[in-house]
Amino acid sequence: MITRRDFLKYVALSSATLLLGCAKKEVTPVTTPTAKPTYKAEFVLGYGKDHKLKGGKWGIGFFPKIHVLERLVEYDLKHDEYVPSLAKKWEVEKDGKIITFELNKGIKFSDGSEFNAEAVKFTVEWLKLNHPLGAETFESADVVDDYTVSINYKDAMFFNLAKMAEFHMSIMSPKSVKPEGDPKGEFVLPIGSGAFKVVDYKEEQYAIYAPNEFWYERFGIKPKFKRFVVKFIKDDDTRVMALKSGEVDAISDYVHGGSAYTPRNLLGPLKREGYNVFKRIIPLTWIIAFNYKKEPFNDVKMREAVDLAVNRDDVVKIFDNQVLPARTLFIEDAPGIKEAGVTYEYDPKKAKELVEEAGYSGAEVDMIVDKSQSDQILVCQLIQQQLKNIGLNVKLEVLESGAYKQRRDSGEYDMRMYYIGGTDRRFYLRMYWRFYPGNKWSAYVSERTGELCKKILKEFDKEKRKQYLIEFYKAIHDEHGVVPLYFDIMTVVTSKNVDADYYSLFHYPNGIPFGEPLFYNVGVRA
Amino acid sequence: MNRLCVTGLGIILLMVILGLLAPLIAGNPYKTDLKDRLEPPSLKHPFGTDQLGRDLFSRVLWGARTSLFVALTISLISMSLGCIIGAVSGYFGGIIDDVIGRIIDVFLAIPELVFNIALVGIFCVAYGVSTWNVILAVVITNWVSYARITRGIVLSLKEREFVLCAKAIGAGEWYILLRHVIPNSIGPIVVLATLNMGNVIMTIASLGFLGLGIQPPTPEWGQMINAGKDYITTAPWLTFFPGLFIALSVLGFNLLGEGLRDVLERKSFIE
């Protein structure tokens, strides 16, 4: 039996051990092996979202859309250009109402069948019947010859071409459905021409892929593994622990509104512990969105005050400076950003004056935040303090996802965190979803910005489009429609025994820059 | 003097004093300073700083106010409610006792924390986020133990001579219940309430840890542990100090409860 004295001794000993654990530890530098490595047959990735390989309202998940399928065109954000992928070239008719694509020959789907105009026609018809974005985009598709297809769109606009680089418009083999080639048929599994093919899938648990030899052959490279296992680990911290315990070789982000990604504040510690952290800045900007249709943020002075009160340098410190402070609406690679010369400043003194001028000094405003987004909760707490300095009392409400959506949709809030842009290919799509008049996911729409957004999405001429974009950035800034906070990143964290490089993680083998991580050249050293 | 009682009382008094003096001895628990984020314990910040550079000592001390206030409120409401329901059930018997007895059985059959999680979720959706959601949810599950104990005590008390005497001189049922029966059953209920305070503190902390309790930026121990768990390897002080305070306060109430029980048992034995 333990006496009271023994008990106290154990308590004291445990406390001392825990306190010693608080001390900083020296990290031993990692040395790089020089011998030519041999690789394991399997590469295991931890990922936060189910791949939905059986389909769903928006089709299969983004991951298989990227890795199993390919698109007719890809988007080069830096040059604001659409570049050939499955399509060799294209011709625009009737201001974009019809686009005729000439396809590359000799491309095969992973099952050995040939990629041709019939496959494109099937995909367009399938998307029109089974996908919200397809339904609002496509009218029909006509096969001109085996390698030429004309797509008729519902509206005449440049946005039609932009959409063809979008995940959702990825091309799949007619054999992906049963009966084969029937757009009304039942979706079985995605068969595409991308780097990987589906081997096995268990909903909410894992997906197993194998390299698509036709894809590797096309690009003249060899895979470094035979099986690519993706484990679905939803909880961000658990995913990091899985990497640390060796259960997975790497973890990667799903960045679409911060749904499932490696917590930014853990990237620094992971790097210090010797893990390889690859990150790519993407044109996704986290913002403060206002309920600008009601008081007090229907007053532009109040929106400007919040804009000037936010210290973005402090915001990024929460993430160990792994993300960048947003002094512009989008990252500098985004078209027209540099030329627009519009920057967002920090001036709390002026912000305070504006609040007083508007007559809201000491007012209470609501800020809602989704409980599942731990990063956002931290940022909102910081913003709460920063706005307190200018005389605004922010009532922070951390809500369950359901309650958050209900409050958001019914307009019962004053401010919330939101995001604009996305991965590179989504630049124009999110322009449409966030700033086009009448869109339910909008961040800010005024007469001026709405008209400019319409012009941007209609204009094929790159230079004219850039001018509209410049005007748009200026309009958003003048009206203080949103408050940019920080630019988000896409990350891949790998174990020490994983061979990966930034270039192949974010470029196609032919050099096309890619906004999402690619794993075709990854190898796990044995 | 019972040593358990004194030790428990000492710990609780220390917690209460620290909580009460928080505005004087600790700084602003909301003040952020990103220059000092994740600083280890030092003279400037005895418990270190958190992700937003807030002083953890201040937050833990202010957290004591939150946790103790919420736990005390829950215990007082639950005790009052449970005592009245249990006393009515035990004293009047019959169909009232049957109905209350079955309700108590139903509540006892559901795991308490699971029930709390469900209730807090429902209240959040229905009434928005508030500390009162947590209080209400825990009270709903917590009154049952008081009712059960009170009912048992009242069942034995109502057959005692002083009750029969009161009836004989014509005292009314409610008068006897309120003036004689409940006051005579208060001893064991106080012991239960003291022991239960520890459980309530744990429940509040558990809900906070699960993100269902008191919401940020209000300092609360469970929620602080939840926020600190991401840094368990790099900044363990974020979880250690709130955890230590939870452990100490639960230990304090348990020791006091055990001590009180010893004292009361001895007293009743002597009587």
Image: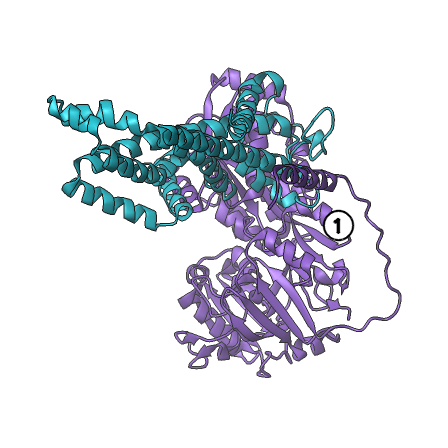
Tag 1, which chain? A
Along the viewing direction, whichever of A386 and A290 lies nearer the viewer: A386
Q: Is residue A359 left or right of residue A511?
A: left
Q: Is residue B61 left or right of residue A182?
A: right
For the rendered model, the colour scheme is: by chain
Along the viewing direction, whichever of A298 and A73 lies nearer the viewer: A298
Q: Residue at x 86, y 63 (%)?
A: A33
Which element type, helix, strand or loop, lies under badge 1? helix
Residue at the front extreme of this rendering: B270
Q: What colour do you see for chain B?
A: cyan
Q: Which chain is purple?
A: A
Q: Is residue A145 left or right of residue B82?
A: right
Determine whether A66 is above or below B154 in the image.
Answer: below
User: In this figure, which residue is indicated by the disc labeled 1?
Assistant: A271
Along the viewing direction, whichever of A281 and B61 lies nearer the viewer: B61
Q: Quadrant of residue A337?
A: top right
Q: Quadrant of the C terminus of chain A?
A: bottom right
Percent of width and height locating residue A195: 65, 72
Q: Quadrant of residue B32?
A: top right
Percent of width and height locating residue A362: 49, 18
